[in-house]
Every structure is written in structure tokens, then in C-alpha cells.
Image (spheres, rainbow, N blue to C red):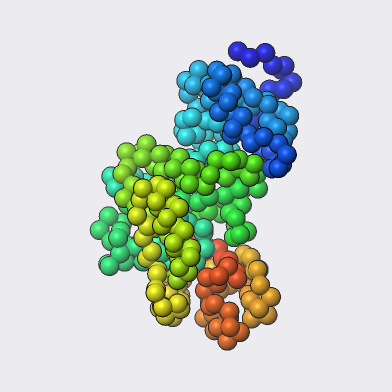
Amino acid sequence: MSSVSVSEIAGVSGCMAPESAFVSDGDIEDFEVMHEESCEKGEEFYRDPASGYLVMTRVLHLKRGRCCGSGCRHCPYAHVNVLPDKDTVQKIQMPAMLHIPRSGLASEVTVLMWSGGKDSFLALRAMLQPQGRLHRVGTAGVVLLTTFDAASRMVAHQEVSAREIERQAKHLDVALVGVPLHGSSAVGYVSRLRAALKVVRDFGCTVSGLACGDLHLRDIRKWREEAVGGGLGLGVLYPLWSDCAGSNYLSLSEDLQASGVPCKVTAVTTEDAKRAGAQVGTVYGPALFAALNEAGVDGFGENGEFHTLAQVWEVPRERALAV
């Protein structure tokens, strides 16, 4: 074993300081690159360039032969021993399952990109309806996938915590894989998603495709299909898509009302949306939808004007999902 002092490794395993200590710095070498270089040399530790603490490498984890349950940064075992009752979502440093439904998973699943907001929620509802992809297999045929910042544990742009995402999955009893993104890592977004899909496949599932809650933005769709779907070798499904922007907004708004799920505004990015009544804490509904349209703001915030959190726990699961 590498020679290290007790003070350098005391109190933690895998990451030798709170994750908040690992901040991005353009002048430091990327920690993933350092990790891989250390592994190639057979080294058991490397020194984190941001904090100065020592971090266990995959080499040492593999020598130990099991997941220690501490949520180590480079755990090669998908955090299988991080117990759900031990605040898993706050610990994991690599992609890991955060919830497994009581009914288990189907042999073939669709992975739904899940932000926790109204659009991804409506996409799930659409997939479960008679004309939807999941109608026959039900929620056993879907895995929610959420990326979040490894330091703050917040979903980018949404101002929603990973813990709230986990709460959604548990209430809906739908599988959820969490994907921490490290700001100082050169490991690309698609590579992280690939690691997340491996976690799903390790549960014995075939991933048949990805699904996204995009509504009509063609540039976003093009990026998802070329960079994400193409990079992962998967097709991308759009349950809410309309080629005519906004043409399905009324039906989507009605479906959201039918679910009974309140969707709270969590972030507002434009002054026009704020003036129309979109304020953090406001519940999104027909009145706000109409006010946004009248103000010339996309009624669903498709351009990122605002973001929401679907508070699914406020209604029974069966009503929320229309199952």
C-alpha cells in the first residue's frame, strides 16, 4: 500500500474531505485524468488537486473486493452497499440506483431523462397511457435518470435537490438512477450517462431507448439525437413532441390538471416571466399559463424561462400516473 499518514485518510473512505471541498479550478489538472494515470501505475491513492487530500483509486477498491458503503468517489461497484436508509443520494460519487420499485424491473426498459419538473412528469404519464410505450408493461418498464451536481446535490437549472428527486421516485415507486456530475471532471456528459446505463444493465435489463420531455425545440432535439443518443447507440423517444410549437400545450395543461399534481415554480430566469407572475414558490396552473401566453412568454417555459418541481407526493400514486 502507498505510504500515507493517518491524518490524511482519517474519517472518510474514497474521498478524504467533504465533496464541497472539491471545487473546479481551471489551473489544476482534472482529477479523473489523475485518477486514471494513478491506476495505470498501480497506485492506490492520488492527491486531489483542489483540496490536497488523498483519494482512494480504483486499484485499492478492487483489492478490497467489495463496496464499503461510504459512497467513495471512484467506487467500481456502483455503490451497491450504500444503504437506502443511510441517505444514499447524499453519498454517491458515481452513478447508482437510488430506488428500485417493489415490483422489480422488466427485462427491457426505457430510460427517461428526469429533471423532476412538469415536462418530464407529463412525459412519464404519456408513456403509461394506452397509446404510450409503457402501457403494457407499466412502470416496471421505465428507469428515471437524473443528473445533478456532485458538490451541491442540485439538479442544474432546476434549483431542485437530488433528495427531492428521490422522494418523487419513491412515491411513484419508479426506478431511479442518480448521476453525480463533477464540475472539475473532463469525463464528458455522455460518458457519465454510459456509466449510468451500465448500472441499469447490471440489474439484468436491456435498455431499449431513451425518452425526453422536450416539446418543440429542434436544436435541443438534434443535440440529443446526435450527441447523446448517437454517443450511446440508442434511439430517443419524445412522448410530448409537437412539430408545431405550442399546438399541444392546451392538452398538456389539461393532463397536468387531471393528475392533481401541484407543480411549484423553483426557478425563474427572465424578467418577462416574472412580470407575468412566475415567481419561485408559485404553483403552475391554468392562470399562470394564460398570463405567460398573454405576456408573450412560452406557456410551458420551453426556452428555460422558468422551471418547476412536480410535487407528486401530494396525491396518490395511482392518480398521479393515471394507472
Asked if residue 127 shows in the view, the reply is yes
Task: Give the answer, above or below, for where 12 lies relative to 281.
Answer: above
Task: Name which residue lies at 59% across and 32% down.
Answer: 33
Residue 144 left/right relative to 131: right
Residue 234 left/right relative to 297: left
Horizontal and vertical percent for residue 267?
63, 65
Task: Name which residue lies at 34% across and 63% down.
Answer: 127
Which quadrant is home to the N terminus?
Answer: top right
Horizontal and vertical percent for residue 10?
69, 23
Task: Name which residue lies at 51% across and 58% down.
Answer: 115
Asked if residue 316 shows in the view, the reply is no
Horizontal and vertical percent for residue 189?
52, 47
Report the residue that reaches farthest toward the bottom. 294
Which quadrant is home to the C terminus?
Answer: bottom left
Task: Name which residue lies at 65% across and 68% down.
Answer: 269
Residue 177 left/right relative to 28: left
Residue sitting nearer the eye, 87 or 295: 295
Task: Give the answer, above or below, for where 247 lies relative to 54.
Answer: below
Task: Give the answer, above or below, for where 138 lies relative to 298.
Answer: above
Counting the numbered discs, the total is 0
Horizontal and vertical percent for residue 212?
43, 60
Asked where in the image residue 240 lies, by quadrant, the reply is bottom left
Asked where in the image residue 259 lies, by quadrant, the reply is bottom left
Task: Give the answer, above or below, for where 59 lies relative to 103.
Answer: above
